[in-house]
């Protein structure tokens, strides 16, 4: 029998594409999408959908029992930019949903849990280039603090209760199917939409701000690959570093200029500059490569092509 999957936060940037991919792989009736509010009609019609507030333990348990769920992808979170505006709300959402899922796993209600961490777990005292898996971690953002704390709890629940929890420290994720929600790396998505619409973009990060990034197809591939890996191979139960591409707004603008020659960019850094300055500029993901054969496919040029083609095709 195919294991039934629940995706929490299915209408978000990662959740939408993850739901689509898992439904294609496992059959639509085996993948239950859920979110606190309705999302795209396409996603809601392509299989079972539940309105679910995952901070509510009983409501989450009801859905899990009702559908006989085996594995959960907990993709609901408040991202870095928004979390700085609503610190307590972000802490509550990011931690309560994680504890609810970890406790349901501990009580045997589900057998496997995916929880996303982020490069935000690192801070200004972390080595910036090729940041290792294990290093100084003093995050200075609300979002980063919640992700680092979450990682410690994931490892604790695995060691103490045997919970099969798996996690990735996502870099900035670049996609065109769903708008991102309140992150610092969102400029790398907005730039494409504005370039195609008005040949101009005002960046909220400075031109030399290098950040680790990844095209969504690679991120979805990594997530599903990690969940399919035999549990004996998973050596890290906090969260795996994941590399991908690293570029600055200036380098991205140059790559877009090759395809849209009239495109122009200005730089007007806002409060998100301080967040970006506290994060690594590139990531060492040797552990993911060694433990579960991770390898990314998209580089800067192929990602730019995919974004421009994707946005154009979606408009037709
Ligand atoms: C954000 O910018 O907050 C996210 C992240 C790096 O986790 N995209």
Image: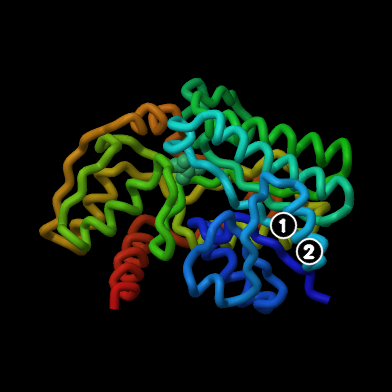
- In-front residue for pair 306/189: 189
Q: Is residue 280 left or right of residue 164?
A: left
**Residues under numbered marks 2 and 1 in contact, where contact means CB atoms less than 8 Å apart:** yes
Q: Residue at x 75, y 46 (%)?
A: 57
Within the image, what quadrant is residue 185 found in? top left
> Percent x, y for residue 158?
82, 41
As helix, strand or loop, the secondary structure at mark 2 comes to loop
Within the image, what quadrant is residue 237 found in? top right
Query: Which numbered dot is residue 249?
Result: none
> Percent x, y for residue 311?
32, 68
> Percent x, y for residue 193?
27, 59
Q: Is residue 310 left or right of residue 15?
A: left
Badge 1: how crowded within 10 Å, few (<14), some, or many (20+)?
many
> Percent x, y for residue 38?
52, 62
Q: Residue at x 39, y 62 (%)?
A: 176
In the picture of the structure, the residue carrying the numbered disc 1 is: 72
Q: How is the image coloured?
A: rainbow
Seen in the picture, residue 209 relative to 229 is either above or below; the reply is above
Q: Residue at x 56, y 45 (%)?
A: 77
Query: Which numbered dot is residue 69?
Result: 2
Seen in the picture, residue 215 relative to 132 is either above or below; the reply is below
Quadrant containing the C terminus in the rendered view: bottom left
As helix, strand or loop, the secondary structure at mark 1 comes to strand
Seen in the picture, residue 15 relative to 121 is either above or below; the reply is below
Q: Is residue 74 left or right of residue 274?
A: right
Quadrant containing the N terminus in the rendered view: bottom right
Marks 2/1: CA distance? Answer: 7 Å
Q: Is residue 87 left or right of residue 116?
A: left
Badge 2: how crowded within 10 Å, few (<14), some, or many (20+)?
many
Q: Residue furthest left?
A: 262
Q: Residue at x 29, y 73 (%)?
A: 315
């Amino acid at each position: 029998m195919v294991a039934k999957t629940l995706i929490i936060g299915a209408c978000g940037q990662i959740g939408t594409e993850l739901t689509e991919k898992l439904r294609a792989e496992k059959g639509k009736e085996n993948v239950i999408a859920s979110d606190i509010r309705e999302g795209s009609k396409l996603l809601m019609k392509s299989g079972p959908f539940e309105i679910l507030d995952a901070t509510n333990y009983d409501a989450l348990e009801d859905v899990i029992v009702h559908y006989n769920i085996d594995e959960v992808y907990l993709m609901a979170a408040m991202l870095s930019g928004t979390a700085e505006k609503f610190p307590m709300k972000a802490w509550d959402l990011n931690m309560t949903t994680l504890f609810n899922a970890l406790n349901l796993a501990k009580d045997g209600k589900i057998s496997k849990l995916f929880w996303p961490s982020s490069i935000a777990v690192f801070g200004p005292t972390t080595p910036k280039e090729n940041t290792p898996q294990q290093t100084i971690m003093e995050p200075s953002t609300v979002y980063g603090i919640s992700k680092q704390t979450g990682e410690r709890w994931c490892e604790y629940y695995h060691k103490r209760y045997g919970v099969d929890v798996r996690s990735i420290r996502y870099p900035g994720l670049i996609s065109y199917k769903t708008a991102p929600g309140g992150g610092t790396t969102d400029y790398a998505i907005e730039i494409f939409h504005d370039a195609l619409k008005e040949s101009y973009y005002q960046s909220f990060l400075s031109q030399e701000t290098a950040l680790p990034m990844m095209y969504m197809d690679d991120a979805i591939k990594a997530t599903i690959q990690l969940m399919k890996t035999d549990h004996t191979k998973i050596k890290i139960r906090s969260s795996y570093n994941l590399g991908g591409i690293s570029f600055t707004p200036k380098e991205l603008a140059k790559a877009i200029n090759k395809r849209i020659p009239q495109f122009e960019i200005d730089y007007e850094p806002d409060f998100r500059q301080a967040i970006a300055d506290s994060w690594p500029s590139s990531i060492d993901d040797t552990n993911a490569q060694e433990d579960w054969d991770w390898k990314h496919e998209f580089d800067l040029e192929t990602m730019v092509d995919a974004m421009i083609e994707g946005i154009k095709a979606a408009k037709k």
